[in-house]
Amino acid sequence: MEPLNFPPGGTLVSVERAQQLILQGHCLCIAGAGHLLEQLPKGVWIAGSIPYFMAQRGGETNSEQLLITEIKHFLGVPKIAFYSAQEIQNIAKDAPENGFSIVIIPAGSSVHEEYARNAPNYEDMYMKPILGWVSGVHLDHLGKQLPSVANGDIGESSQRQAVVMHVELPPDYSAEINTTNLFTQGDGPVFQFPQAGFHASQCSVDNDKTVNLAEYIQQNNIDIRLPLVADYCGMLVNISIREVGESTVTFYAPVFDGVDYRFARPLDDYQSQFQQQLPANTDSIQFSCNCILNYVYCELENKDIAIKGPMTFGEIAYQLLNQTMVYLTVDNTLE
Amino acid sequence: MKDIDLCKSALGVHPPWSVEKVRVDAKGRRVDVWLGQQSNSGLLRAASKAFSQQNWISWRHLNMFQHHVFIHAHRNDDIQQKNVQWLGQPGLNLTRAMAKQVVKMLSEGTSYSAVCSLLELQLSDIWPIKRALDEGRLTLGGKKVEVKNSKAGSPTPLLHAQADDGLPTIDDQVWEKIAAGVLDVHIKPLALKLLIAKIRGQLVNIDEKEGRQVKLNEVRRYFVKHRQKLSGEIQHLKAIA
């Protein structure tokens, strides 16, 4: 079977074309509106619901087509399985010794919360590449529809479980996860939180005083499109703000205790800065996803970025990230 | 009576603690040992109803004569004694001795599944221990480690003891220094950055040597598994050590 000649990160196709590719036996990761996923036949694929993409025409909202990413170079048949909130702790343990695992998690589900809070402590986490994304719905349908994922192996979808594809690679191939994050820590104060969670009220500022974060944001007119940024040994990890209530701030990913956060430095032109940070050689990129908040805040609709993929409700590079592009490269180590 | 004396001797139970009751299930390869403190023991013996499960906390102890051993202590007794190895922490399901054995094996690089297999435990038995260790709540009654976080610290035998895999052994201070961020090693892989950041945060709450070595061994395991990809980092590490 000839590999598909899609751009790095995938391409938008019709439902009929997606059905053809599945029946031809291609191994696929699929993103698209939930009602389209229900029309796909059984096969070697996983999928998640989302109608926002960076695709061949640039950024677009599309509920009529599916974004297809082909998985190549694998050994044997990739293993596909649903994982409940109780089972997801086994994801890294179940992953192949040489390969990678792609996970798609429905936003707002218990498995989403479990993964966000505890993934860093799962057995074998960081030892094997694990990446993926959080599925969502059209922003106009928030609260009316539930995000879903689908398991092509058994032809079923779920709003409560994560779906995972474990892909084993031949010994001469190697997978690596990378991220592109345009945000850097600003010059403002350092915030620390007393406990991990998606919500925060009290926090310390510059290890000095305790403040209510919601009041602090309002009093200091902080632009909440800018995420809180933590420095993990040189990797910058964003925590995006979902809502600022009267006394509580809600995040798209949990903050952790013992970690220093600063609000990000503002960006001038996301599209051009993004292009500058992309890897020079994109040939080995197999899979990619970016954040819906980058799509909305940075107004990426109709703007093109070289690496394609779904614009998601959360990105996963081992752990849950926000406002970050995640991509997977697979290289032949002998070349 | 013989069972009580044997368990008292084998466990090393000493006053004010005593062995109140022993039940051996030879077919099920299980021994249950109920402990009490002398101040309460008369009361316990007198009231057989006090042996009802709700009044007792139970922990899995080290295996004995191919039997699984379960220790039960009364909630009203002083079970918070950190140096008593045949008791466990409330909320955990292994005695300190068993938890210590688990942690020791993990610190030596034994996989979770191998630990389960060798000690005849379930992963669900080990998971609360791992979580307590990650969160700095596990007390094993062991030696505390003084971590040198200064680059100008006293000389340490870095990289002298080599394991078969060509990397410094887990006893080597180099792993503490990598985790503490005091070695200026340029780390490229995203996974290793995230792993070290996690371990650094967890080590803040872990004083005991065995517990620290479990965490440091996670970093070492990464280097072992990915040593071909990390040749640059390893060379750099050797050069500055």
Image: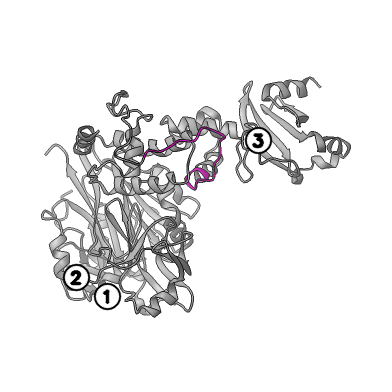
Residue beneath label 1, please?
A297
Q: Amino acid at mark 1?
A: Tyr
Disc 2 crowd rating (10 Å Cα; few below 14, some 14-19, many 20+) is some
Q: Amino acid at mark 2?
A: Tyr
Residue at left offset 13%, top offset 63%: A276
Viewer can see residue A20: no
Query: Mark on residue B87?
Result: 3
Query: Mark on residue A270?
Result: 2
Q: Which coloring applies here?
A: one colour
Predominant SS along the magenta part: loop
Q: Amino acid at mark 3?
A: Leu
User: How many numbered badges does the structure rendering display?
Assistant: 3
Dot 2 or dot 1, earlier in sequence: 2
Residue A252 on image: x %, y %: 39, 67
Q: Which residues are magenta?
A: B132-148
Verify CB contact (< 8 Å) between mark 3 and mark 2: no
What's the CA distance linking mark 3 and mark 2? 58 Å
What's the CA distance linking mark 2 and mark 1? 9 Å
Q: Using the rendered view, name the quadrant where residue B63 is placed.
A: top right
Looking at the rendered image, the quarter that the C terminus of chain B falls into is: top left
Residue at left offset 60%, top offset 37%: B94
Residue B180 on image: x %, y %: 35, 43
- Which residue is outermost to the right? B46
Taking the image as shown, residue A26 lies to the left or right of residue B145, namely left
